[in-house]
Image: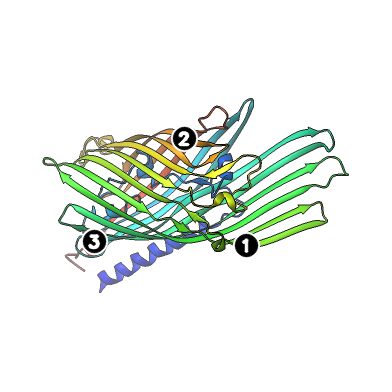
């Protein structure tokens, strides 16, 4: 009975924390969950994948299997766990970004909750996982002025904020001790607000203001598999693959236009009638693991947004004079992890895990006919605390977005912290 009460208590506390994380991250109005001038396009800037554990290795994880960390990039990875273990991950992240275009420069910082996930055993060779993570971030505030021969001095301003998040539940099982299959169902939701204004110094011209308020949601699913091939004792080669389905985007969009204080036009549309969708995604990866000491992995993902119709719906397409078009995005990621001696009782730093990685991202859209690409390097480490596999993971992401000569250069320094929680459930105690 005491063991049952302990189980109920842990479940209640976990669900409470999950609901709290959902409440905090769902509050997007008036705040910046991320900041980039490129988040003006489509649904914004896609969030870097994974938890702090994944991101400190360049974002790999499609072929990673670990009994110490929660891997949310492939639902099939959940079966790589101790049979009675409960695992959770709570992540925080921030970014310092420097933007430059010719002689113009700007600096911005953001900080946000990244994820809250927990994983648990179900029955023999199966496991479950639930959590919440960001999908995309919208945050920008751009202004410039120019002189017009007829209208005089005028100022253009555009700003936006918000983002999309997903709540998900996943299930996985292992067949023949080597092949693991997983499935994940997700509910995506969020608010995105965009506004553009033109202010005239000349009184004979009326100021112009346009804006869009987007409330979006949809259900989507993701499938995953991993096959682990033993090489020699303690050495493993793992192949992984994932597929995320393209799904229709639902919700509403409110578009308004104002000229001075006299003319105001407001229209409301149902997104489901626009056949708007989020692109599908396929990912493959291969990893090499040497027991609990070394992990090396390379991943490739491809996402197709070319049929999303985002270039035909106000709020997603109206980005001034820049030609926006949804397209095919790609990414290549490589990372490693190294633990000198997990069981060293003399030197603490030898029990820590050190990680690094590199990545290349190609945006899911084109702006002015060109993709907005990004490259970066990552570093990180996990500091073990208390007993079992509990630890604190810290990571650093240094990169640049906008590699073409004609694009705004975004140099960023991201940091993330993940709290890895591990416990044993249903363990029979020798004494009550």
Q: Separation of disc 3 and disc 2 at Cα?
A: 37 Å
- Sequence-wise, the earlier of marks 1 and 3 is 3
Mark 2: secondary structure:
strand
Q: Quadrant of residue 367?
A: top right
Q: Which residue is mark 3?
A: 126
The correct choice, above or below, for 68 with respect to 376 in the image is below
Q: Separation of disc 2 and disc 1 at Cα?
A: 34 Å
- Judged left or right of residue 106, residue 356 is left
Judge by depth and name the residue closer to the eye, 258 or 385. Answer: 258
Q: Which residue is mark 1?
A: 269
Please rate how many residues cluster around mark 3, counting C-alpha atoms within 10 Å: few if below 14, some from 14 to 19, many from 20.
many
- Sequence-wise, the earlier of marks 3 and 2 is 3
The quadrant of the rendering that contains the N terminus is bottom left
The correct choice, above or below, for 384 with respect to 28 in the image is above
Question: Residue 176, position in %: x, y?
Answer: 15, 56
Of marks 2 and 1, the one in the foreground: 1
Q: Which residue is mark 2?
A: 374
Q: Residue at x 33, y 69 (%)?
A: 8
- Sequence-wise, the earlier of marks 2 and 1 is 1
Judge by depth and name the residue closer to the eye, 409 or 235. Answer: 409
Judge by depth and name the residue closer to the eye, 220 or 390. Answer: 220
Residue lying at the far top of the rendered structure: 103
Question: Residue 124, position in %: x, y?
Answer: 19, 63
């Amino acid at each position: 009975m005491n063991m049952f009460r302990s189980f109920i208590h842990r479940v209640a506390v976990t669900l409470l924390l999950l609901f709290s994380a959902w409440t905090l991250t769902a509050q997007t109005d008036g705040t910046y969950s991320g900041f980039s001038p490129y988040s003006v396009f489509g649904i914004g800037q896609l969030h870097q994948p994974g938890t702090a554990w994944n991101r400190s290795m360049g974002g790999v994880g499609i072929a990673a299997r670990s009994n110490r960390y929660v891997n949310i990039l492939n639902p099939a990875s959940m079966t790589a766990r101790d049979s009675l273990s409960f695992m959770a991950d709570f992540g925080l992240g921030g970014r310092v970004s420097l933007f430059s275009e010719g002689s113009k420069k700007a600096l911005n910082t953001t900080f946000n909750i990244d994820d809250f996930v927990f994983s648990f055993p179900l029955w023999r060779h199966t496991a479950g996982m639930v959590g919440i993570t960001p999908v995309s971030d919208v945050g920008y505030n751009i202004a410039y002025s120019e002189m017009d021969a007829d209208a005089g001095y005028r100022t253009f301003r555009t700003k936006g904020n918000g983002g999309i998040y997903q709540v998900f539940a996943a299930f996985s099982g292992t067949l023949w001790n080597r092949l693991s299959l997983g499935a994940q169902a997700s509910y995506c939701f969020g608010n995105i607000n965009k506004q553009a204004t033109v202010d005239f110094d000349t009184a004979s011209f009326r100021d112009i203001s346009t804006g869009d308020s987007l409330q979006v949601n949809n259900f989507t699913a993701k499938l995953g598999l991993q096959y682990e091939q033993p090489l020699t004792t303690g050495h493993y080669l793992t192949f992984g693959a994932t597929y995320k389905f393209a799904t229709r985007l639902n919700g509403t969009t409110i578009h308004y236009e104002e000229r001075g204080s006299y003319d105001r036009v407001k229209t409301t549309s149902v997104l489901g009638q626009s056949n708007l969708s989020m692109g599908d995604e396929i990912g493959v990866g291969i990893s090499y693991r040497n027991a609990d000491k070394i992990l090396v992995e390379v991943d490739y993902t491809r996402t197709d947004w070319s049929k999303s119709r985002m270039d035909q719906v106000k709020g997603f397409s109206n980005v001034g004079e820049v030609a926006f078009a949804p397209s095919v995005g790609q990414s290549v990621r490589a990372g490693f992890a190294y633990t000198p001696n997990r069981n060293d009782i003399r030197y603490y730093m030898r029990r820590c895990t050190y990680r690094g990685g590199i990545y290349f991202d190609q945006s899911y859209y084109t702006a002015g006919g060109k993709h907005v690409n990004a490259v970066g390097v990552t570093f990180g480490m996990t500091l073990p605390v208390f007993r079992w596999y509990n630890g604190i993971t810290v990571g650093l992401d240094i990169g640049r977005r906008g590699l073409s000569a004609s694009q705004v250069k975004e140099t960023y320094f991201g940091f993330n912290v993940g709290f890895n929680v591990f416990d044993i459930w249903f363990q029979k105690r020798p004494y009550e």
